[in-house]
Amino acid sequence: MRRAIYPGSFDPITNGHLDVAERALRLFDEVVIAVALNEAKHPLFDMEERVALVKASIPALQGHERLRISSFDRLLVDYAREQEAVAIIRGLRAVSDFEFEFQLALMNRKLNSEIETIFLMPKDNYTYLSSRIIKEIARLGGSIEGFVPESVRLALARKFGS
């Protein structure tokens, strides 16, 4: 079985993330969406909430039965090895993402040369999406419909009291 890890903070998951996950399913037998513990990012949603939002978001995806949701709080390459993954999936929205993602991929390769990093781009209409921008729009009372799954829209409305 060819398994890939799609890591991220997913705070919250967006339609762009889901598009990348669906693209990854075309390449791998199983994809693990791995919600990362990264307190440096000061997440709006705690780990349990983020995992629950990812779980609520995937049923509509083509091939969702081959998606697994997990969380991790250790070095990504160690987690990938534990999961017997052959690849790490990273989404690229714009050229500005590339430099940082490239550095991460090279470091991961240095730490474990057996795990490849695969960069996937979302559909054009999702390239401008980021969790940070979605949270800001929601916080200011703007519409995020069409940018995130309905469960995420409702969770953000509850967080921001709108």
Image (cartoon, rainbow, N blue to C red):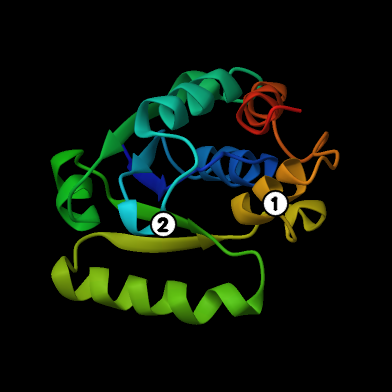
Q: Position of residue 53 (x, y in %)?
A: 52, 25
User: In this rendering, would 141 be left or right of 17?
Assistant: right
The crowd level at tag 1 (other Cα within 10 Å; few <14, some 14-19, many 20+) is few
As rendered, which of 9 and 77 lies closer to the eye? 9
Q: Position of residue 25 (x, y in %)?
A: 52, 37
As rendered, which of 156 and 91 lies closer to the eye? 156
Disc assigned to residue 112: none
Mark 2, residue position:
41
Work out whether residue 67 can be spotted. Answer: no
As rendered, which of 150 and 157 lies closer to the eye? 157
Which three-letter amino acid code belongs to the residue tagged 2?
Lys
As rendered, which of 37 and 91 lies closer to the eye? 37
Work out whether residue 129 can be spotted. Answer: yes
Quadrant in the picture for residue 50: top left
Which three-letter amino acid code belongs to the residue tagged 1?
Glu
**Labels 2 and 1: the sequence-earlier one:** 2
The crowd level at tag 2 (other Cα within 10 Å; few <14, some 14-19, many 20+) is few
User: In this rendering, would 147 be left or right of 155?
Assistant: right
Mark 1, residue position:
136
- Quadrant containing the N terminus in the rendered view: top left
Separation of residues labelled 2 and 1 (CA atoms): 15 Å
User: Is residue 112 shown above or below 84?
Assistant: below
Helix, strand or loop under label 1:
helix
